[in-house]
Image (cartoon, grey):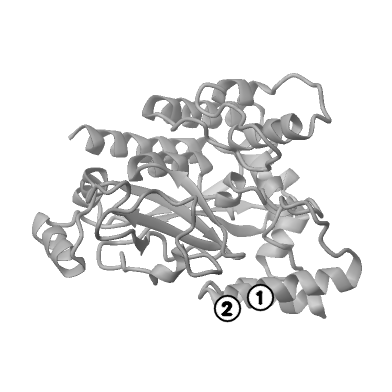
Amino acid sequence: MKDTQQLTEIRAGVLSCLDGLPGVVNVRSSNAGPSSPASISAWERKHATLLPDDLKDFYLLWDGLALRWDVIAHRREIVPLGCMAINSLAQLEPVDAAVLLDEREESRPELPKAGPGGLRPFNLDATCECGRILLLLGCDGMPRRAEVWFQDVSCGLTRLAPSFAEYFRLLAVSLGLPRWPYAHTDAGLDPTARQWFRLLAPHHLAVSEDNERSATATAASAPSPAASLLAAAWPPRGGATKGLGLAAPLTHSQALALLQRAGGAAAQTATPVAAGAPREAVALLHGSRPAAPFGASDAPAGGRPRPTGEAGGVRRHRTLRAAAKATGLSSKMNESRAVAHEE
């Protein structure tokens, strides 16, 4: 029951951290009761696969997770912001295996080795609007071996964690900020999301920024204190990248330490969100101006610059909307951004 205790401690750490962040209000956590062992066995029979032990422990504690919180933005406006969610057992539904294939309908080389039954993707977070969180079962030929991957709106796949327990810790230290999975992709965080991270989760953002400086060799400044704190867990990854590049899993003790320091440091030094919330971020949340979910750079990781100017922006957002529709990731948020940008 070690995983059960750690899951409980991480959830308590998140609540304590949010309680210490200036400007964070209305923290709401679901009180879903535990799933029964019989319901877990029934799910495994229905889908002809086995759940990993750490995910079983989660469902034996809570039948899903829904933790939301708001911030007090400029003009004392209450804005919904954070969302940490994991589907209930009934919502843990399979995803079309075509998401694991490339344009030649072959298995993507970056994916883990599949067993005789193949990789089985399941939707782990139905609330995710910036892509899809995939639980891959049957990794490395082991029935109970699972990894968590992120499918972005361009259909790219990025591994977030080598197990559910490690994904839960990663989700916790992100505090459920908007579009947080992009911090771990080559595209990186968009400017609006980056502002929210800088205000509320600099401990998470610092490594991404240090990796960018290391990759581009354009800055010789020393790593920030937050980046130094994370160095043991997230040493910079080689090559040009905007992602955090987790070279080692985030351990339980490291996650707790980050949450404790983030809440304590914010209570002592952070500017209240009411006085310093990014107006562009608030405008985006209200749908009044568009923002691409890709990184701030005009050049993708592949090297060829993206189109610039008004026409380039229209083409980028049309491509984004088409990709979202083609992969079933279309949402009102993404479509509204693309339409607004075209106008």
Label 1 SS: helix
Q: Which residue corresponds to the image point at 50% horizontal and 26% vertical from the top-left?
A: 233
Query: In the depicted view, which residue is nearer to us: 3 or 102?
Result: 102
Residue denoted by label 1 = 321
Looking at the image, residue 39 sits to the left or right of residue 21; the answer is left
**Picture residue at 47% right of the left edge, 28% below the top:** 260
Q: Nearer the viewer, residue 203 or 78?
A: 203
Q: Position of residue 102 (x, y in %)?
A: 52, 65
Which part of the image, by quadrant, shows the N terminus?
Answer: top left
In the image, residue 176 lies at what x, y percent?
A: 51, 50
The residue drawn where x is 59% and y is 73% is 324
Instruction: Point out residue 114 in the picture as x, y percentages from the top left corner.
Output: 33, 53
Mark linked to residue 325: 2
Whether residue 68 appears in this view of the structure is no
CB-based contact (under 8 Å), mark 2 and mark 1? yes
Q: Is residue 47 above or below residue 115?
A: below
